[in-house]
Image (cartoon, grey):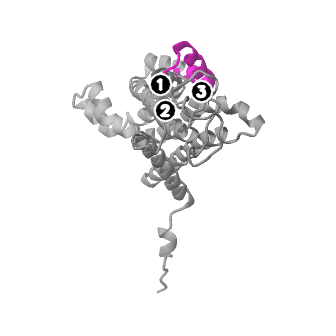
Amino acid sequence: MTTFKLPINRLSRPNLTTQLMRIGLVITISFILIALFAPILQTIGILKDPRDLLSFPIQEAPSFNHWFGTNIRGYDVFSRTLFGTQAALQVVLLATLISMLVGVPLGLISGYQGGRIDRILLFLMDTIYTLPGLLLSITLAFILGRGIFNVAIAVSISYIPQYFRIVRNQTVSVKNELFVEAAQALGATPFRVLTKYLFFNVIQSVPVIFTLNAADAILVLGGLGFLGLGLPEEIPEWGHDLKEALADLSTGIWWTTLYPGLALTTMVVGLSLLGEGLSEVFNRGLNTKR
């Protein structure tokens, strides 16, 4: 009898998607740690006050005193770049949580109830989905005004239909399963069916959408800040700092745009890699079950 030996090293070696997902996870965790420890680093004197604009020279090149230089207002670019992580994470977490907390329950109700409620919610979500996300966020930010919570609301609206569609379609396919029909036959109320039997069976893909929306939300926040519709000027935010540094490029001052832009790009890439990796793992899990 001929025996075949599988290449163990090849089987144990992670594929490219897994490797990229690990890179994205490391990048994301790094930014979270920066956001958490930035105030501590300022307290012990490693970071300068990101709102102090009177004590530093204007547009000073990177040096030992100012590692990333200073901008046109005299802000320390290094401290504002690191503290900008806090604003990005706060707005992104709020925006994605708001959209998830609205979209997931509406998707469950729409998919389970069907009928007129389903048609009304589908029409409403399709209407929101057809609007350009950035344009909708700009309009809402202009109406609501500046501030972390207001900007989070403005950013979150365009993401609600994505959670709604995914959860609604999953609910429609799962609600006719035998375990759901058995629960209904035993007298389970619609609320109990939704919360106990359907919820955990239809939210497997929500973390994937959450991660990808977080990456997009950072870009939207940067766009709002660049247009002057984001956070108050004294709060460190990458988009606003890029707006103020735009005129510096023509004079050869590169550090005021490089570091905020690099931080924004790196964080978006990290979250995108993490989201794509989770999507691949989720799809692979579904195919294995089938």
In the rendering, at what x and y percent does residue 161 appear? 51, 27
Left of 218 or right of it: where is 59? right
Q: Most prominent secondary structure in the magenta stretch? A: helix
Residue under circle 2? 87
Is mark 1 in CB contact (under 8 Å) with mark 2? yes
Which mark, residue 148?
A: 1
> Which of marks 2 and 1 precedes in the sequence?
2
Q: Quadrant of residue 53?
A: top right
Mark 3 is on which residue type? Answer: Gly
Residue stretch rendered in magenta on the structure: 125-148
Instruction: Report the front residue among 37 and 273.
Output: 37
Instruction: Report the front residue among 179 and 111.
Output: 111
Element type where label 3 sits in the image: helix
Instruction: Report the front residue among 174 and 245.
Output: 245
Cα gap from disc 1 to disc 2, whole angstroms = 8 Å
Residue 155 shows in this picture: yes
In the rendering, at what x and y percent does residue 30 appear? 47, 48
Find out whether residue 128 is within the magenta segment.
Answer: yes
Residue under circle 3? 225
Find out whether residue 119 is within the magenta segment.
Answer: no
Dot 3: few (<14), some (14–19), or many (≥20) neighbours within 10 Å? many
Mark 1 is on which residue type? Answer: Ile
Mark 2 is on which residue type? Answer: Ala
